[in-house]
């Protein structure tokens, strides 16, 4: 066998598709795009995952969990790593210099993993409750520990009692001590006075008073 006799395995290298080179190529005329439609046109492309207006798959599936964007920027430091370090003051710069945390880390947190037997001063990094207890038990101290700010307590909600319902006042009947006669209005009093005065004038004109000289005239006739 010679080098010029070596050939690839059958089927491993397929011939290139000669698109739009006539009927003989197998992909002439429509060049594999079919007849009409959006995909048959030049520039007829839509965004990846588009399903013709139907709710796409990436929106139909539910969301699960939560990925914090700061999870990679805060490194975890074990107590066993601090035990191996020579520095007495453990801060972010000392951890980076010792290669315990990556140089890209913007923060660090001390966790309970391993044992700590020597006295150290932890400064400017976070620490769990167990890690604090371990550092203090070894005779060390913690300075400027970063803690999560606690949310202020919510003020108690005051529940106001509904105002008491007023009972409807009952009208007092006539003759009872609470009953009072309605006062006549000034307009009704004026109308009554005018009616009385007009009635008196009418009586005088009709014959309330005898005409002068009536008796004398009757005597002469008799």
Image (cartoon, rainbow, N blue to C red):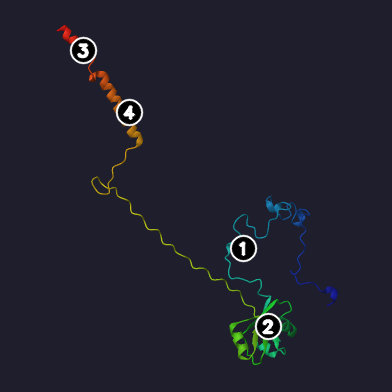
Other residues around mark 4 within 10 Å, as few (<14) / some (14–19) / many (≥20): few
Q: CA distance from mark 1 to mark 4?
A: 94 Å
The foreground one among 208 and 31 is 208
Mark 3 and mark 1 lie on one chain; the one further toward the N terminus is 1
Q: CA distance from mark 4 to mark 3?
A: 32 Å
**Label ID, residue 123:** 2
Q: CA distance from mark 2 to mark 4?
A: 105 Å
Q: Badge 4 is on which residue?
A: 194
Q: Quadrant of the C terminus?
A: top left
Q: Which residue occupies 59% across, 87% down?
A: 133
Q: Quadrant of the N terminus?
A: bottom right
Q: Which residue occupies 35% across, 36% down?
A: 186
Q: How many marks?
A: 4
**Label ID, residue 124:** none
Mark 2 and mark 1 lie on one chain; the one further toward the N terminus is 1
Secondary element type, mark 1:
helix
Q: Is 7 above or below relative to 203?
A: below
The foreground one among 29 and 39 is 39
Other residues around mark 3 within 10 Å, as few (<14) / some (14–19) / many (≥20): few
Q: Badge 1 is on which residue?
A: 58
Q: Quadrant of residue 62?
A: bottom right
Q: Badge 3 is on which residue?
A: 214
Other residues around mark 1 within 10 Å, as few (<14) / some (14–19) / many (≥20): few
Mark 1 and mark 4 lie on one chain; the one further toward the N terminus is 1
């Amino acid at each position: 066998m010679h080098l010029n006799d070596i050939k690839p395995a059958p089927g491993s290298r397929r011939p290139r598709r000669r698109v739009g080179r006539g009927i003989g190529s197998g992909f002439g005329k429509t060049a594999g795009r079919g007849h009409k439609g959006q995909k048959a046109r030049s520039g007829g492309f839509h965004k990846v995952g588009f399903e013709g207006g139907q709710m796409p798959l990436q929106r139909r599936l539910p969301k699960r969990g939560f990925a914090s964007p700061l999870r990679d920027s805060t490194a975890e430091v074990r107590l066993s790593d601090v035990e191996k370090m020579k520095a007495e003051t453990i801060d972010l710069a000392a951890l980076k210099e010792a290669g315990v945390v990556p140089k890209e880390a913007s923060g660090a947190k001390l966790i309970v993993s391993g044992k700590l037997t020597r006295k150290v001063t932890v400064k400017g990094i976070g620490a769990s409750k167990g890690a604090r207890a371990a550092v203090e038990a070894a005779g060390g101290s913690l300075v400027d520990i970063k803690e999560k700010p606690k949310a202020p307590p919510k003020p108690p909600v005051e529940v106001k009692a509904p105002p008491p319902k007023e009972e409807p006042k009952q009208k007092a009947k006539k003759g009872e001590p609470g009953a009072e006669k309605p006062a006549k209005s000034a307009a009704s009093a004026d109308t009554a006075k005018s009616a009385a005065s007009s009635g008196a004038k009418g009586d005088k004109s009709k014959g309330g008073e005898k005409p002068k000289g009536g008796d004398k005239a009757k005597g002469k006739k008799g």
